[in-house]
Image: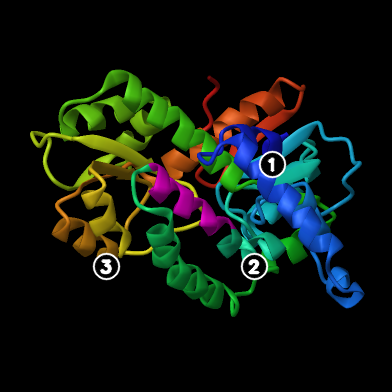
Amino acid sequence: MAVKMGMKADPRGEKKVIQYLEKEKKRYEDMREEEKNEFDLDSLDNPYGDTRILFGDPEKDVKRVLVGIDIEVGEVLLADRLTEKGSSIDLIITHHPEGKALVSLYKVMSIQEDILALAGVPINVAEGILSARIGEVKRNILPLNHNRAVDAARILGFPIMSMHTPADNQVVKLLQKKIDQNNPETVGDVLNLLKKEYEYSEAVKIGAGPTILIGSKERRAGKVLIDMTGGTSGSEDAYIKLSQAGIGTLVVMHMGDKHRKEAEKSHINVIIAGHMASDSIGMNIILDALEKKGVEIIPCSGLIRYKR
């Protein structure tokens, strides 16, 4: 369900994602037998390497789930404690990937190439910009302890899955549609529009709501781009190209200092929408659909649960 919803909300368009899956099937068919043995068969139907069942029987019935933005060993122990106290947890869902889904995070970054192209950056330039960054992310992920939380879930007998890019696609679709419909004039107008979403208004109460990183409330927003999907932060080389393509304001979940400096040089306004709140919006859209199927949701670990 999450994958299907993610494909429908994919910024590249569902048709293009289906074409990508068809290419993957063809690539698999042409492989040597030893290559097929190492191939991730899930990728023939699921284009999001960061969204996977990490442990557990896929046929298990699910009535109650524990869902968090991050699931680590502590949250797995929380599931065990809840079950011990009578609130049986059938499945743990993490937004940010763990296990093999974390190892494959870099694979979804190609989405960012198409986002840049849709914003007006030539696709050959977009692919060139992202190439080095994708390699960097892959190398940075390799030495991590990927399976720590998954091992804890396995030992305690809890099925666990990750749901990353499909949820991020939802928040991009919702916010970009809202921006395009309202056509905000200033950066302050964009900020106010964001704060009307429940998750952002709740985040404001704890000081983690939307904030202007570059620019001011009075500055004119120009063309606004919501940039919140594609695995993780892209290349800092993208900002000059986005500026040249006519983007005036970027709305992102988070931004590192190197990226901030480059965006500032390119005179792009930047609004940090808030990481946990943005992730919560995307997850909530999918969790609403899950809840309609009769599954009880127990939110934890930064998830601001809100039913639309």
Q: Are marks 1 and 3 in contact (CB under 8 Å)?
A: no
Q: Main secondary structure of the magenta part?
A: helix
Q: Relative to residue 216, is residue 53 depicted above or below?
A: below
Query: Where is mark 1, residue-wise?
Result: 18
Is there any visible trace of residue 108 in the rendered image? yes
Q: Does label 3 or label 2 sit earlier along the sequence?
A: 2
Kindly identify the amino acid type of the residue bearing the numbered disc 2. Answer: Val
Numbered circle sitting on residue 258: 3
Disc 3, disc 2: CB below 8 Å?
Answer: no
Instruction: Name the residue beneath numbered marker 2.
Output: 103
Instruction: Decide: is 64 above or below 34.
Output: above
Per the image, label 2 sits on a secondary structure element best described as helix
Q: Residue at x 83, y 69 (%)?
A: 31
User: Is residue 243 rendered to the left or right of residue 279?
Assistant: left
Q: Amino acid at mark 1?
A: Ile
Q: Please state the extent of the stretch shown in magenta in the rendering.
A: 108-118
Give the alpha-carbon distance from disc 1 to disc 2, as whole Å: 23 Å
